[in-house]
Amino acid sequence: MIVFIIPLKSKAVSKDWPLTSSLLRQTLNSISTQSVSEFRAIVVCHDLPDFEIDGFNFVELIQVDLPVPDNDSASQMRKDKEQKLEIGLNRALEIGCSHMMKLDADDLIHRDLAEYILKSPADVNVVNRGIIWKRGTTWYQADNHTFHRICGSSSIFRSTVFRVKENDSDSDPPGQELFTSDNHEAVYEISEKMGLEVANPPFPAVCYCLSADSRLSEMYHPDHKESLRALIGRLRRMRLLTQQTRTMFALK
């Protein structure tokens, strides 16, 4: 069984809480359409989303009493996300999952991702192929080599990489840094040091969704100044959003 661990931002730092809840719901929809049934999701949050979560019977909600981060402090936001991921990781290990994936609360996964992961012999799968879609548009950008550099929903781990903490005095589970780190590119380096086998899904496995309530990768931030070469490269990777792509990621 694969568990998707979703750290949800608090209402206090959300620019638009109904939108945040709507994006989470779409993420859960994409999980619910998986081609196999051996999956669960853990949402770690300060506040309950404003939709009926009971409609997603594969979801476990964990409410936390962590300090609410300052939205203007990148370090506090990063720490909040890392703490929620750690809580989700330990819970996933407790329920005996075989794999876990950290998934941002506004990204979508390909319907065949869980099936691929459950068959993969690798310790770690890095999603280096995906699509970038701005909500409300009919085009997307295909990234077939470096997707993991810009999207946080790009690492899936076999549970044997970790172990359950027996008490609070225990040191962090081995590999925890690998799971909670915000440095997407460090996965290869840390995995190599740990002697882990790394693989890549052979299809675009994640949709990185751009919206007004997202903390965007620097290269997609409104203030980012794109070079002419980068602009030409991006335009070459643009694709029309077909019904097949919408179905694969449960896009609405």
Image: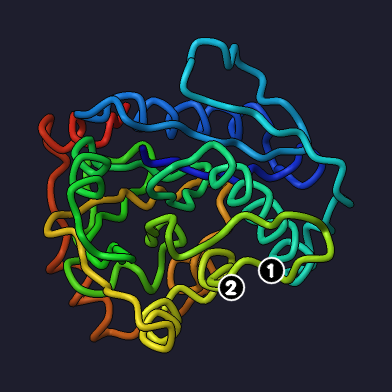
Amino acid type, label 2: Glu
Percent across and percent down for residue 186 are 45, 81
Residue for point 53% across, 27% down:
22
For the residues labelled 1 and 2, say whether their Cβ atoms are less than 8 Å apart.
yes
Amino acid type, label 1: Asp
Q: Secondary structure at mark 1?
A: loop
Residue nearer the viewer, 246 or 195: 195
Residue for point 49% across, 67% down:
217
Q: Is residue 137 above or below residue 247?
A: below
Indicate left or right for 41 with 119 as reference. right
Indicate left or right for 37 with 78 as reference. left
Q: Secondary structure at mark 2?
A: helix
List the residue tagged with mark 2.
Answer: 177
How far separated are the C-alphas under marks 1 and 2?
Answer: 9 Å
Percent across and percent down for residue 34 are 26, 30
Kindly identify which numbered label has been placed on residue 172.
1
Q: Write down the quadrant of residue 32 in the picture.
A: top left
Quadrant in which the N terminus is drawn: top left
For marks 1 and 2, give the one nearer the viewer: 1
